[in-house]
């Protein structure tokens, strides 16, 4: 199973994005990132959208 198709845990998402587990948990609770269980491309795309919106 590859990172492209495997469902990810929150810790794996934090590792993938290079952010802390706590930061990822906050962003998931706020709705900026999807909840755990999706694939890496989904989290990367959501992170890019969040950062772009954050920078205005």
Image (cartoon, rainbow, N blue to C red):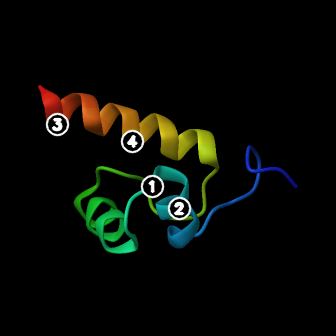
Residue 45 % position (x, y): 47, 34
Q: Is residue 15 left or right of residue 46?
A: right
Q: Residue furthest right?
A: 1
Which one is earlier in the sequence, the residue at label 3 or at label 4? 4
Q: Going 27% across and 36% down the picture, which residue do you hit?
A: 51
Measured from the top left, where is residue 4 in percent x and y?
Answer: 74, 43
- State yes or no: discs 1 and 2 in contact (Cβ < 8 Å): yes
Q: Is residue 18 left or right of residue 38?
A: left
Give 44 or 29, whichever is nearer the viewer.
44
Q: What residue does disc 1 label?
A: 18
Which residue is denoted by mark 2 in the rendering? 15
Which of the two marks, 2 or 3, is nearer to us in this view?
2
In the image, which is nearer the foreground, mark 4 or mark 1?
1
> How many discs appear?
4
- Calculate the distance from the C-alpha at mark 4 to the C-alpha at mark 2: 13 Å
Pick the quarter of the image with the C terminus.
top left
Q: Is residue 8 above or below residue 33?
A: below
Identify residue for label 4: 47
């Amino acid at each position: 199973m590859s990172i492209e198709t495997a469902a990810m845990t929150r810790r794996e998402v934090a590792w993938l994005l290079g952010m802390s587990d706590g930061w990822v948990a906050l962003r998931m609770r706020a709705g900026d990132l999807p909840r755990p269980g999706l694939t890496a491309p989904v989290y990367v795309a959501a992170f890019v959208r969040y950062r772009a919106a954050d920078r205005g």
